[in-house]
Image (tube, grey):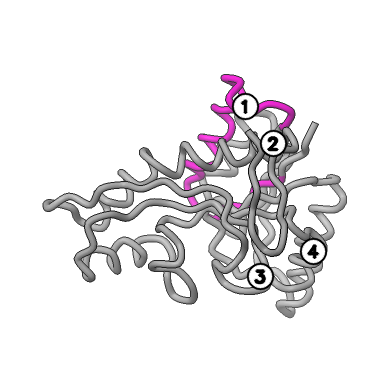
Amino acid sequence: MLKLGVLVSGGGTNLQAILDAVKSGRITNAEVSLVISNNAGAYALERAHMHGIPAMCISPKSYESRDEFHKALLFELQRHQIDLVVLAGFLVAIPPMIVEAYPNKMINIHPSLIPSFCGTGFYGLRVHEGVLNRGVKVTGATVHFVDAGTDTGPIILQKAVEVQEEDTPELLQRRVMEQAEWKILPEAIDLIANGRVKVENGKVRISR
Protein backbone atom coordinates (compact mmCIF):
# COMPACT_ATOMS: atom_id res chain seq x y z
CA MET A 1 0.00 0.00 0.00
CA LEU A 2 1.51 3.30 -1.17
CA LYS A 3 1.47 5.92 1.59
CA LEU A 4 0.62 9.35 0.19
CA GLY A 5 1.65 12.63 1.76
CA VAL A 6 -0.44 15.46 0.30
CA LEU A 7 0.87 19.02 0.55
CA VAL A 8 -1.69 21.81 0.22
CA SER A 9 -2.06 25.54 0.76
CA GLY A 10 -5.78 26.23 0.37
CA GLY A 11 -9.18 24.62 0.07
CA GLY A 12 -7.95 21.18 -0.86
CA THR A 13 -10.22 20.41 -3.81
CA ASN A 14 -7.53 18.21 -5.37
CA LEU A 15 -7.10 16.47 -2.00
CA GLN A 16 -10.85 15.82 -2.03
CA ALA A 17 -10.60 14.40 -5.55
CA ILE A 18 -7.91 12.00 -4.32
CA LEU A 19 -9.95 10.97 -1.27
CA ASP A 20 -13.04 10.41 -3.43
CA ALA A 21 -11.03 8.34 -5.91
CA VAL A 22 -9.61 6.15 -3.13
CA LYS A 23 -13.12 5.61 -1.73
CA SER A 24 -14.61 4.76 -5.13
CA GLY A 25 -11.77 2.43 -6.10
CA ARG A 26 -10.40 4.60 -8.92
CA ILE A 27 -7.19 4.72 -6.90
CA THR A 28 -6.05 1.31 -5.68
CA ASN A 29 -3.04 0.25 -3.59
CA ALA A 30 -2.71 3.74 -2.11
CA GLU A 31 -4.00 5.72 0.86
CA VAL A 32 -3.62 9.28 2.07
CA SER A 33 -1.49 8.96 5.21
CA LEU A 34 -0.60 12.60 5.88
CA VAL A 35 -1.75 16.09 4.92
CA ILE A 36 0.52 19.10 5.46
CA SER A 37 -0.30 22.73 4.81
CA ASN A 38 1.84 25.84 5.10
CA ASN A 39 -1.37 27.71 5.96
CA ALA A 40 -3.05 27.07 9.32
CA GLY A 41 -6.38 28.30 7.95
CA ALA A 42 -6.41 25.97 4.93
CA TYR A 43 -9.73 24.13 4.64
CA ALA A 44 -7.75 21.16 3.32
CA LEU A 45 -6.69 20.44 6.92
CA GLU A 46 -10.35 20.22 7.91
CA ARG A 47 -11.00 17.82 5.04
CA ALA A 48 -8.21 15.60 6.35
CA HIS A 49 -9.54 15.70 9.92
CA MET A 50 -13.02 14.70 8.70
CA HIS A 51 -11.46 11.60 7.11
CA GLY A 52 -9.39 10.75 10.17
CA ILE A 53 -6.11 11.52 8.39
CA PRO A 54 -3.16 13.00 10.33
CA ALA A 55 -2.90 16.67 9.31
CA MET A 56 -0.70 19.54 10.39
CA CYS A 57 0.42 23.04 9.55
CA ILE A 58 4.13 23.56 8.94
CA SER A 59 4.60 27.23 8.13
CA PRO A 60 7.82 29.04 7.20
CA LYS A 61 6.69 31.76 9.61
CA SER A 62 7.19 29.38 12.53
CA TYR A 63 10.90 28.91 11.87
CA GLU A 64 13.90 31.19 12.13
CA SER A 65 15.16 30.24 8.69
CA ARG A 66 13.91 28.67 5.48
CA ASP A 67 16.36 25.84 6.02
CA GLU A 68 14.78 25.00 9.40
CA PHE A 69 11.34 25.00 7.78
CA HIS A 70 12.55 22.64 5.04
CA LYS A 71 14.07 20.29 7.62
CA ALA A 72 10.81 20.21 9.59
CA LEU A 73 8.83 19.42 6.44
CA LEU A 74 11.18 16.62 5.44
CA PHE A 75 11.21 15.25 8.99
CA GLU A 76 7.43 14.83 9.06
CA LEU A 77 7.33 13.21 5.62
CA GLN A 78 9.97 10.71 6.68
CA ARG A 79 8.48 10.18 10.15
CA HIS A 80 5.20 9.13 8.54
CA GLN A 81 7.10 6.90 6.07
CA ILE A 82 5.57 8.62 3.05
CA ASP A 83 6.18 6.81 -0.25
CA LEU A 84 4.80 9.41 -2.65
CA VAL A 85 4.59 13.15 -2.02
CA VAL A 86 1.70 14.84 -3.84
CA LEU A 87 1.81 18.62 -4.33
CA ALA A 88 -1.86 19.54 -4.64
CA GLY A 89 -1.88 23.32 -4.77
CA PHE A 90 1.13 23.76 -2.48
CA LEU A 91 2.33 27.32 -3.01
CA VAL A 92 5.77 26.90 -1.50
CA ALA A 93 8.90 26.13 -3.51
CA ILE A 94 10.27 22.66 -2.81
CA PRO A 95 13.99 22.80 -1.97
CA PRO A 96 16.64 20.46 -3.44
CA MET A 97 17.05 18.63 -0.11
CA ILE A 98 13.45 17.36 -0.31
CA VAL A 99 13.52 16.72 -4.07
CA GLU A 100 16.67 14.63 -3.59
CA ALA A 101 15.02 12.66 -0.76
CA TYR A 102 12.13 11.71 -3.08
CA PRO A 103 13.58 11.11 -6.57
CA ASN A 104 10.67 10.38 -8.93
CA LYS A 105 8.54 10.01 -5.80
CA MET A 106 7.05 13.49 -5.76
CA ILE A 107 4.38 14.70 -8.18
CA ASN A 108 2.73 18.05 -8.85
CA ILE A 109 -0.50 19.10 -10.55
CA HIS A 110 -0.12 22.26 -12.64
CA PRO A 111 -3.15 24.03 -14.22
CA SER A 112 -1.83 24.36 -17.77
CA LEU A 113 -0.44 22.24 -20.57
CA ILE A 114 3.26 22.37 -19.72
CA PRO A 115 5.49 23.84 -21.18
CA SER A 116 2.93 26.63 -21.68
CA PHE A 117 2.13 29.01 -18.81
CA CYS A 118 4.41 27.41 -16.26
CA GLY A 119 7.56 28.20 -14.33
CA THR A 120 8.31 31.05 -11.95
CA GLY A 121 5.32 33.34 -11.38
CA PHE A 122 2.73 31.05 -12.94
CA TYR A 123 0.56 29.69 -10.14
CA GLY A 124 -3.10 29.82 -9.13
CA LEU A 125 -5.20 32.37 -11.00
CA ARG A 126 -2.08 33.85 -12.63
CA VAL A 127 -1.93 30.82 -14.92
CA HIS A 128 -5.47 31.36 -16.16
CA GLU A 129 -4.97 35.11 -16.51
CA GLY A 130 -1.98 34.36 -18.71
CA VAL A 131 -4.01 31.97 -20.85
CA LEU A 132 -6.79 34.52 -21.40
CA ASN A 133 -4.39 37.40 -22.02
CA ARG A 134 -2.60 35.37 -24.68
CA GLY A 135 -5.85 34.38 -26.36
CA VAL A 136 -5.10 30.66 -26.66
CA LYS A 137 -8.03 28.38 -27.47
CA VAL A 138 -6.98 25.30 -25.49
CA THR A 139 -5.49 24.98 -22.02
CA GLY A 140 -5.60 22.13 -19.52
CA ALA A 141 -3.63 20.53 -16.70
CA THR A 142 -0.45 18.51 -16.28
CA VAL A 143 0.73 16.00 -13.68
CA HIS A 144 4.51 15.76 -13.57
CA PHE A 145 7.30 14.50 -11.38
CA VAL A 146 9.08 17.21 -9.40
CA ASP A 147 12.73 17.88 -10.08
CA ALA A 148 15.09 20.71 -9.14
CA GLY A 149 13.49 23.11 -11.64
CA THR A 150 10.08 24.82 -11.59
CA ASP A 151 7.50 22.73 -13.51
CA THR A 152 10.33 21.05 -15.44
CA GLY A 153 10.09 17.42 -14.26
CA PRO A 154 9.02 14.47 -16.46
CA ILE A 155 5.38 14.72 -17.55
CA ILE A 156 3.10 11.86 -16.49
CA LEU A 157 -0.35 12.90 -17.78
CA GLN A 158 -1.96 15.88 -19.49
CA LYS A 159 -5.57 16.71 -20.29
CA ALA A 160 -6.80 19.50 -22.55
CA VAL A 161 -9.66 21.88 -21.73
CA GLU A 162 -11.31 24.24 -24.19
CA VAL A 163 -11.14 27.97 -23.48
CA GLN A 164 -14.53 29.65 -23.96
CA GLU A 165 -15.31 33.14 -25.18
CA GLU A 166 -16.98 34.28 -21.96
CA ASP A 167 -14.30 32.91 -19.63
CA THR A 168 -12.94 34.87 -16.70
CA PRO A 169 -9.86 33.56 -14.87
CA GLU A 170 -12.16 32.22 -12.14
CA LEU A 171 -14.49 30.43 -14.57
CA LEU A 172 -11.57 28.92 -16.46
CA GLN A 173 -9.87 27.85 -13.24
CA ARG A 174 -13.01 25.99 -12.16
CA ARG A 175 -13.42 24.24 -15.52
CA VAL A 176 -9.77 23.17 -15.61
CA MET A 177 -10.19 21.73 -12.12
CA GLU A 178 -13.40 19.86 -12.94
CA GLN A 179 -12.47 18.62 -16.42
CA ALA A 180 -8.75 17.99 -15.97
CA GLU A 181 -7.11 18.30 -12.55
CA TRP A 182 -9.59 16.19 -10.59
CA LYS A 183 -9.36 13.46 -13.23
CA ILE A 184 -5.67 13.15 -14.07
CA LEU A 185 -4.23 13.58 -10.57
CA PRO A 186 -6.05 10.51 -9.19
CA GLU A 187 -5.28 8.63 -12.42
CA ALA A 188 -1.56 9.38 -12.10
CA ILE A 189 -1.54 8.26 -8.46
CA ASP A 190 -3.27 5.00 -9.38
CA LEU A 191 -0.77 4.35 -12.17
CA ILE A 192 2.18 4.95 -9.84
CA ALA A 193 0.65 2.91 -7.01
CA ASN A 194 0.26 -0.04 -9.34
CA GLY A 195 3.80 0.10 -10.71
CA ARG A 196 2.84 1.24 -14.19
CA VAL A 197 4.97 4.39 -14.38
CA LYS A 198 8.69 4.35 -15.13
CA VAL A 199 11.07 7.21 -15.84
CA GLU A 200 13.65 6.44 -18.51
CA ASN A 201 16.08 9.04 -19.87
CA GLY A 202 14.04 11.84 -18.33
CA LYS A 203 10.75 10.74 -19.88
CA VAL A 204 7.80 8.84 -18.45
CA ARG A 205 6.79 5.47 -19.85
CA ILE A 206 3.36 4.15 -18.85
CA SER A 207 2.51 0.47 -19.15
CA ARG A 208 -1.18 -0.11 -19.70
- Looking at the image, residue 1 lies above or below residue 111: above
Q: Which residue is mark 4?
A: 72
- Looking at the image, residue 1 lies above or below residue 106: above
| Disc number placed over residue 60 in the picture, else none | 3
Q: Marks 4 and 1: which is nearer the front?
A: 1
Q: Amino acid at mark 4?
A: Ala
| Disc number placed over residue 32 in the picture, else none | 2
Residue 24, image x and y in percent? Answer: 57, 19
Q: Say whether disc 4 or disc 1 marks the residue closer to the N-terminus.
A: 1
CA neighbours of label 1 inside 10 A, class few (<14), some (14 to 19), many (20+): some
Range drawn in magenta: 5-30
- Looking at the image, residue 47 lies above or below residue 164: above
Q: Quadrant of residue 137?
A: bottom left
Callout 3: SS: helix
- Looking at the image, residue 47 lies above or below residue 91: above
Q: Marks 2 and 4: which is nearer the front?
A: 2
Gap in Å between the C-alphas at discs 2 and 1?
9 Å
The single residue placed furthest to the top in the displayed view is: 24
Residue 14, image x and y in percent? Answer: 51, 42
Check contact, mark 4 vs mark 3: CB within 8 A: no
Can residue 41 be seen by looking at this rendering? no
Check contact, mark 2 vs mark 1: CB within 8 A: yes
Q: Which residue is mark 1?
A: 22
Q: Say whether disc 2 or disc 4 marks the residue closer to the N-terminus.
A: 2
Describe residue 42's horizontal placement relative to residue 154 as left or right: left
Q: Marks 3 and 1: which is nearer the front?
A: 1
Gap in Å between the C-alphas at discs 3 and 2?
23 Å
Gap in Å between the C-alphas at discs 2 and 4?
20 Å
Callout 2: SS: strand
Check contact, mark 2 vs mark 4: CB within 8 A: no
Residue 53 or 138: which is nearer the viewer?
Answer: 138
Q: For residue 15: magenta?
A: yes
